Image (tube, rainbow, N blue to C red):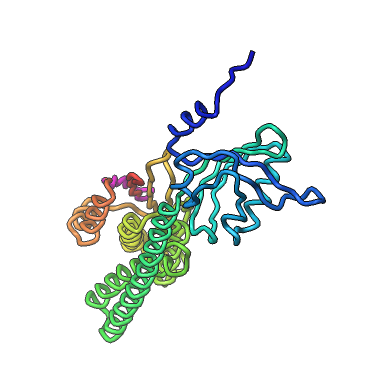
Amino acid sequence: MPLQMTPREIDSILGFLADGFCLCEMLTDAQGRPVDYRFLQTNPQFEEMTGLHDAIGRTAREMVPDLEPFWVETYGQIAFDGESRRFQHESPAMGRYFDVHAMPTEPLGCFALHFRDITETKRIEAEREQALAEARQLLIELNHRVMNSLGTISSIISMESRARPEGEGRLALGRIGRRVQAVANLYRRLNASDSIDTVCSRDYLGQIVAGLTASIGRDDVRIEARIAPVRLSTRIAVPLGLIVNELVTNSLKYAFAPGIDGTVIVALDTIGTDELRLEIRDDGRGLASEARDAEASGIGQKLVRSFATQLGGDPVIDTGPEGTAVTLRFPTG
């Protein structure tokens, strides 16, 4: 025999619910189309969640004349089609946003609502999204200004370099210019993409390699990029780009005698899910001991080790008659 409960016992149980609850019956027109619904039973939280008082026996449109058609149409489907639904929806007429779980009940045409007023939650979410959008716009503007500033600095360095005679001074300015340009490339990629704080490794490093290829002025040395497409944060992208710039420049400087063909390979691979491996490899003559000693004490190698430390890695150099390879493994996080 099914358990029978008195209305008072049901009210007592409903009173323990933290959310709003109501039992309703759907009202239809002569053609059987839902036009309104009547509240049959509510719990104490119903009034708090809806702002509607003394609702039992009254209809929704009676209490909220401008009630949106969505509510009647949706509840009509639930009451007559027999399928429960969970959804969130706003009622401008009531000035509230609800999280609703609606389910059909017996007899046909009745339904129960278990719901919560989430107006304040939605307001906080909207304010947070607006704040994030404003911060995003500010960061976009900052990236654009940094890109322009670096471009101006790079142009000034280039002008100074061209104004100087051939020699170490001009070469030094060229190296400085390429370092500045490597950072400028990052902000150029950020400015051209939808992201404000990450960049695609293939696009970014590929642009640096292309710039170095154009700058070497040699048809007999080829620079090949084998870059896995990975999203790099700016924290990683800046030192990584500068490392690529320094190591490729070093290979071009030491690996190939004039008139000797050769290849420099720039490779970036993923290792598992949380590590990357950068390798700069050439098939040149390798570094003699005196050249290695000079290079180890040079600014380029000091910069490489400093940037590698920022990435959390330590470069490993392997050199011999068949060429030189520098490998750097570092975490992505």
* Res. 161 in view: yes
179 vs 189, left or right, is: left
Name the one closer to the observer, 331 or 233.
Answer: 233
Snapshot quadrant of residue 245: bottom left
64 vs 75, left or right, is: left
Count of numbered labels shown in the rendering: 0
Residue depicted at 53% across the width and 40% down the height: 42
Snapshot quadrant of residue 296: bottom left
Query: Does the stretch in magenta take in 29?
Result: no
Query: Does the stretch in magenta take in 321?
Result: yes
Q: Whole-percent x and y of residue 254?
A: 31, 60
Bounds of the magenta segment:
314-324
Q: Whole-percent x and y of residue 29?
A: 77, 51
Name the one closer to the observer, 273 or 197.
Answer: 197
Q: Looking at the image, which residue sits at the far top? A: 1
Q: Whole-percent x and y of residue 59?
A: 62, 50
Q: Looking at the image, which residue sits at the far right? A: 31
Residue depicted at 48% across the width and 41% down the height: 20
Residue depicted at 19% across the width and 60% down the height: 298
Name the one closer to the observer, 86 or 64.
Answer: 64
251 vs 298, left or right, is: right
186 to 316, vertically: above or below: below
Q: Main secondary structure of the magenta part?
A: strand
Q: Looking at the image, which residue sits at the far bottom? A: 163
Quarter of the image that includes the N terminus: top right
Q: Whole-percent x and y of residue 222?
A: 46, 62
Residue depicted at 26% across the width and 55% down the height: 307
Snapshot quadrant of residue 285: bottom left
Name the one closer to the observer, 273 or 314.
Answer: 273
* Res. 320 in view: no
